[in-house]
Structures are given as structure tokens and as C-alpha cells.
Amino acid sequence: MEGSPYTPHAPDDRAAMLDAVGAESVEELFDVPEEVRFDGDLGIEARSEQAVRTELREMLGRNDDLVEFLGRGHHAHYVPSAVAHLADRSEFLTSYTQYQPEVSQGFLQALFEYQSMLVELTGMDVANCSLYDAAGALGEAALLAARLRRGASGSVVLVPEQLQAGRHGLLERYADGAGLSVATYPMADGGVDLSALRAHVDEDTLLVHAESPTVRGAVEENLAAVGEAAHDVDALFCVGSDILSLALLTPPAEVGADVVVGEGGALGVGAGYGTGHGIFAAREEHLRQIPGRLVGASEDATGRRAYTLTLQTREQHIRKERATSNVCTNQAWLALRTAIHVAALGPEGMVDLAEAHVRYAREAAAKLDRLDGVEAPADGRHHVREFPVRVAVDATRVRDDLLDRGYAVHAIDGDLLQVCVSEQTVDHVDGLVAALAEVVA
């Protein structure tokens, strides 16, 4: 940046700034270990494009060729080619944040449609145009609850004991910064243990979170009762789901949800095992406490319909103490991909796809259940996509043996596996059944 017209990096300017902070050199301002400091040489040999492609092809060719029956929040759905063709247009792909509505009408309209899709799927009044991921959305729900009850006694966020570990961990980090605590309530047979939940809910409860489908793919049948338990102590009720399951299950608003969070990248993005975006919807009374960005519809000076970002209560736009979040890049491009995929499916296509994943799970479980030493599903629940499988031998060993045969599944604990089936893997179920028969024999 030497000589930059935007920042004062001339020697005299540097000396004046160092003197003001009491440092003798710029290096003193940074605690960078010697072994990782840049010494001017990246150690990367220069080579041609063809040579780099050849090396990468050989490197990637060493990856295991696996059929992945993995899930637990990361779902491998087929993404139509139209999604990439439309989302890769330069006006979408190069857009950062649509601050200037006069030049961003197309993208803003697409995000408004995305929000409208979420409102219809969840039954809630308002949705934002995405967060980083489902874990962050749950953390933001806890912060929203804390803002709504500022000064009240409630400080405990209750979550199911089977919550995905990554989501639980991130929630604890959010909660710690806000002076909240996270506690778990028991599950029974893959669903909420209502009597145990009621014993955990008291006047110190701030938020109760439940999921449907759960991390094990089970449809939670007692969401309304969970919501009643939360509202009995004036706590907020948060429902976690994903954008495809919402097309089939009872809308969370109808079971008393105050906030809905979950994963949106299941459609439009696919399983990136980290790449996705969080969905967030809430009741209108909480509108001004919703984190992130919202796109609103209005009219321009000539009376034409126009779109603009609204209620951007992040700390760059408003006094820090009144900000609802510091969400910056809001995954808008990923939300756009989801909106395109949902629009391509249409309402009937969404329902058909969701029903197919109930059927895939049921049929795969039935095939596995016929094997000696295998119980599938290992609970008495209905499932979307995935389900637990109980085996008569060590689940970790079974998982590893299946890997050797080209199939990847989750090992949950001593005798439980978890299998997720989508339209990407349904044709490989018979192979998995045959491999599991060998492993447990």
C-alpha cells in the first residue's frame, strides 16, 4: 500500500502514527509468530496452467469414491442446471450487498421473492433474506429472545439433547456473549420427552427450541405441546426445520412458533458440508428485532413497484447499542440459488419432492430391517430423508467396514448408525443393504 492515495503510508505519516501509539515499528503492533511470518517467498514453483491442471487432477483422483448416505443437516439434493445458469449471471454473481436500490432492482426482487417463499412455507409473518447458516440462525434467535425480554429474569435457552453438535457449540458461543446459558432437555424414542421438558421449563427459561425433522430425521409430533410449555412461562418458542421439509409438514406458525430457523441450502446449493445459508422467519410483532437484512416493496416517484433494503439495524447502520446483529455479507447469492430452485419446482413439485423423501426413508429402512442383526428405523417415528439404524455389533466398526466397501454412513453411538437417502442416492440403496449384510454377518 506504499503511496496509496487513500491511506497515509508515507514514512513521515507512519512515524507520526507509531509515535502516537508508543511503538517503534509496525511489526510491534502485530503478534505474529516467527515461524508463520511471510519472508517474501511463497515456496510455490511457477508452472503452466496445463501442469497445474494435471497435478490437481491427480491429487483429486486420490479421493475415495464413496456413495454418501450422510445427512444430519447436510442434504445432497439434485440441483437443476437452471439454478447455476441463472445465478451465475454477472449481475448476480458479482453483487455484494444491494445497498443502491436504483441499480439492484432485479436482485432485490429475487430476494423479496425468497422472503415471500419462506413466509408461505413457515406460515410466519416476515422473513429475512438469509443468514450464514442454520447454527447462526439459532444463535440469532436466542439473541432476539434476549432483546425482547431485556431486564426480565429469563436467561436459559433450552434445546433438545440430540441437537447437532455444531449447532449446539455455536449457540453456546452466542449465548456466552449475551450473558445467557444453554441447557438441554431429554428426548424419548427420537422425539421430545414432554414430561421431562415440562420439568425443565421454569421462570428462568428464555427460549425453547425444538426441531422437526430432528437431527435424526424424525418428524416431531408434539411441537404444539412444546410451544404451550414455552408460552406458559412467557418464553419464546423456536422451531428448527429445513426448506424442503417445510413444504410437507405443518407450518410452524400453526403450532405456536415465534421464530423459525433452519437450513435453506438444502435446495439450490446442495451438500457442501459447510456451504449453505440460514433461514430466519418470525412473527410481525418481532419485526424490528429480526437480525440481518429485509427487502421491502414500495413505489418509486412514478408510482412503479420498487424494492429496497429496509430495517437494516446492523451496527454499521445504526447506533451500536440499538443494532440487532453484525451480520454483514448475508449469503444473498446462496439465497438467490434457493429461490430459483424453489421457483423451478413450484408448489406441487416441492410437495412431491418432500413426499418422495419420506418414501425413500421408509422403503430403505424396510430393506435394512429385513437383515439379521439390524433394526431400522431404531425408533417408532415417521422420518424425512434419514433414520437411525440399530445394529447388533459395534456401530463404529460397521461404519468403518462400510467405508471400505464404498459407502459412508454416520455412527451415532455404540449400536446406532444413521442413514440418509435422497434422490441422489436412492438408486444405491440395494448396494448399501448388501454391504451391510456382509458387515453384520
Image (cartoon, grey):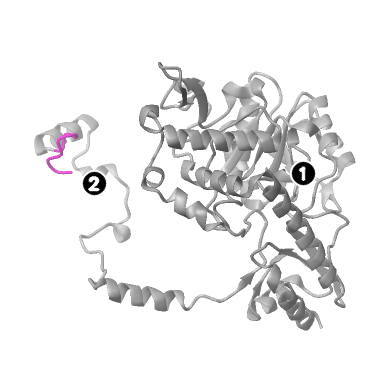
Q: Secondary structure at mark 1?
A: loop
Upstream in the sequence, badge 2 or badge 1? 2
> Residue sitting at 52 percent across and 29 percent down?
294
> Residue sitting at 81 percent across and 62 percent down?
362
| Vertical position of residue 229 compared to residue 356: above or below | above
The image shows residue 146 at horizontal and vertical percentages of 63, 26
Q: Is residue 343 magenta?
A: no
Residue type at mark 1 is Leu
Read off the magenta span.
1-9
| Marks 2 and 1, how far apart at CA | 57 Å
Residue denoted by label 1: 249
The image shows residue 66 at horizontal and vertical percentages of 60, 74
Residue denoted by label 2: 27
Residue type at mark 2 is Glu
Q: Secondary structure at mark 2?
A: helix
Disc 1 crowd, CA 10 A, few/some/many (<14, 14-19, 20+) = some
Residue 259's label in the rendered image is: none
Q: Is residue 2 magenta?
A: yes
| Vertical position of residue 397 compared to residue 135: above or below | below
State which quarter of the image contains the C terminus: bottom right
Q: Is residue 180 visible?
A: no
The image shows residue 212 at horizontal and vertical percentages of 75, 46
Q: Nearer the viewer, mark 2 or mark 1?
A: 1
Disc 2 crowd, CA 10 A, few/some/many (<14, 14-19, 20+) = few
Callout 2–callout 1 Cβ contact below 8 Å? no
| Vertical position of residue 1 compared to residue 151: above or below | below
